Amino acid sequence: MQTLGIKPPSSGEDGQLGQNPGGDLSPLLTGAAVVVATAGAILALSDADSPLRGPFTLFFLLAAPAMAIGAALRELDPFARTVVSVAGAITIDLLVAQGMLAVHRWSVRGGIVAVTVISSLVLLLVLVRRQRGRTVRRRA
């Protein structure tokens, strides 16, 4: 019969216990996504003649509202939050386009600005709600 035990974490070359030498890539990927989305918005607003303008702008139009909605839905599990935030981003983009077409004011720059403003307002409301929740907890 063999006794099973818990193996202690091995120390890395730098002497720190339990550290993954590869590290977590999610902050790096989030930073890269923000850079690509920002570059897409800047390329679209400056009317630059670049082959990356289309893909980066499309990424911005999906990522900006999706990240704002995802920040508002932190209570959901990751898969549900991803599905709902992407669906919400597509909905926001379509509503902006439909509204601009309805009032005969369609423009690429106007759409980028409208999506940016809506995403910023959603993110601002989330931050205000969290701050208000923290102050209420401190008083109680």
Image (cartoon, rainbow, N blue to C red):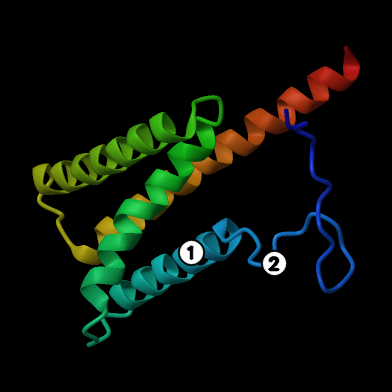
The label on residue 103 is none
Q: Which of 60 and 124 is in front in this view?
A: 60
Q: Classify 134 as above or below 55.
A: above
Q: Residue at x 82, y 73 (%)?
A: 13
| Amino acid type, callout 1 | Val
Determine crowd level at label 2: few under 14, some 14-19, many 20+ residues with C-alpha closer than 10 A. few
Q: Mark 2 points at which residue?
A: 21
- Mark 1 vs mark 2: give the one in front: 2
Compared across the picture, whether 120 is left or right of 107 comes to right
Query: Marks 1 and 2, how far apart in space?
Result: 25 Å
The percent position of residue 99, horizontal first and vertical second, equals 18, 41
Disc 2 residue type? Pro
Q: Quadrant of the C terminus?
A: top right
* Pick the front one: 115 or 30: 30
Mark on residue 34?
1
In front of the other: 116 or 99: 116
* Percent position of residue 31, x then y: 54, 65
Question: Can you tell which quarter of the image residue 2 is in?
Answer: top right
Q: Residue at x 10, y 42 (%)?
A: 102
Answer whether labels 1 and 2 touch (C-beta < 8 Å): no
Location of residue 136 in the rendering, given as x and y in whole percent from the top left corner: 80, 19
Q: For this view, does 29 lie left or right of residue 50?
A: right
Secondary structure, mark 1, is: helix
In the depicted structure, whether residue 101 falls above or below residue 36: above
Seen as rendered, the residue at the extreme front is 1
